[in-house]
Image (cartoon, rainbow, N blue to C red):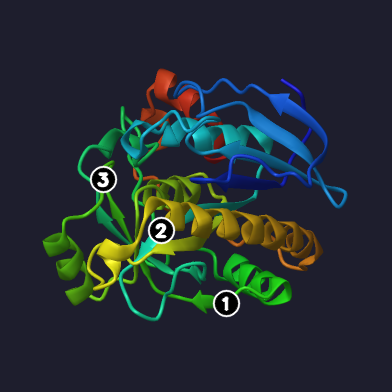
Amino acid sequence: MNTEKIEIGIIGGSGLYQMPELENVREREIETPFGKPSDAFIVGELDGVTVAFLPRHGRGHKLTPTELPFRANIYAMKLLGVEYILSVSAVGSLQEQYAPTEFVIPDQFFDRTRARAHESTFFGEGIVGHVAFSHPVCDELGDILEASCSQVGVKTHRGGTYLCMEGPAFSTKAESNVYRSWGMDIIGMTNLQEAKLAREAEIAYATLALVTDYDCWHESHDAVTIDMVVEYLNKNVRNAQLVLKDAVKRVTEKQTPNQYRDAIKNAIFTQPDHWPAETAKKLDAIVGKYRR
C-alpha cells in the first residue's frame, strides 16, 4: 500500500459526491478486513492540504443507508492515516428553528436503527471493547466547522440531537411527531454508525448536517415539491464545499493533537493474551498498538 499519510478525511452524503476544488486528484482503492468501502477514495489537495474524500453512498448514489459498509469506510480511513473526519449529511428538521438551507452541527445522536448491529462496532469475535460515547463528536472539530460556516456566511446552529433512523423510507407523520416530543432536533439515516466506529478507531469525528426540509410534521410539508428539495440540496452542497475548504485549513493550523488518539486505551476488556489471532490480525490497525 502507498505509505502516504492523509490526516483529514471527508465523507460526503446525499448530493455531495465530489469536491470541485480538489487539485492533483487521484483515486485510492482500499481493501479492508471488512470488505470494500462505498467507493474508491478521491485523494487530492485543498489549498495545499491533502485530504481523502469518500462519497458515502458511492458515486451515482448506489447504496441505501442500511447497505452502507460503515466498518470498511472507517477502517479504510484508519489505514490511510486519517486523524480527523468531517462528515456531511443531508437531514430533515424536526424543529421550527432549523430551516431548509441552514446547517446544524449536532453534538448528540439517538439511535433508531434496527438492522445494523454488525456495522456498529469493530469489536466482537473474541475481543471485547466498551468505549465511552457520552459525548459522541469532537467539540474541537465542531468549533472549527462553526467558524468556517461563519466565514462562508451560512446560518448555522451549534448543538442538537441527530436522530438516526433506519430508512430508506422517510418517517410517518406519527413517528415524526413522537421524535419531536422527545426533543430530537434533526433526522438522518447515516451518521451514528460512523461516529461510533470513528471513536473505536480513535479518529476525531464531527457532523455538518445540511437541512433540506421540515420532515413530514410541518404544516407546510405537503406543499414541498421534489424540485424544491433538490434546489435546497444543491444550495446546501455548494455551501458545504466552501465550508469544508475553509475547515480543512483550520484543522491543519490547530495547535492541539487529536484528543481521541487513545480513546480505547482502557476500553478493551479482553486481555491481549486471550485475543484470537485471527481477530487480532483483523483489527490490527486499531488495537495492534495495545498488544505490543
> Circle 2 sits in a helix, a strand or a loop, which is it?
strand
Q: CA distance from mark 1 to mark 3?
A: 28 Å
Q: Which mark is residue 91?
A: 2
> Contact (CB < 8 A) between labels 1 and 3?
no
Q: Is residue 165 above or below residue 160?
A: above
Question: Which residue is under mark 3?
Answer: 166
Asked whether the residues under the numbered discs 3 and 2 touch, taking CB atoms below 8 Å apart as contact, a structural biologist would say: no
Q: Quadrant of residue 166?
A: top left
- The percent position of residue 125, horizontal first and vertical second, equals 31, 27
Query: Mark 1 sits on what residue?
Result: 155
Q: Residue at x 16, y 62 (%)?
A: 173
Proximity of marks 1 and 2: CB atoms separated by less than 8 Å: no
Task: Say which residue appears at 50% left-offset and 60% top-offset.
Answer: 232
Can residue 263 be seen at all in this image of the molecule?
A: no
Looking at the rendering, which quadrant does residue 65 occupy? top left
Q: Tag 2: residue type?
A: Val
Q: Nearer the viewer, residue 129 or 271?
A: 129
Q: Amino acid at mark 3?
A: Glu
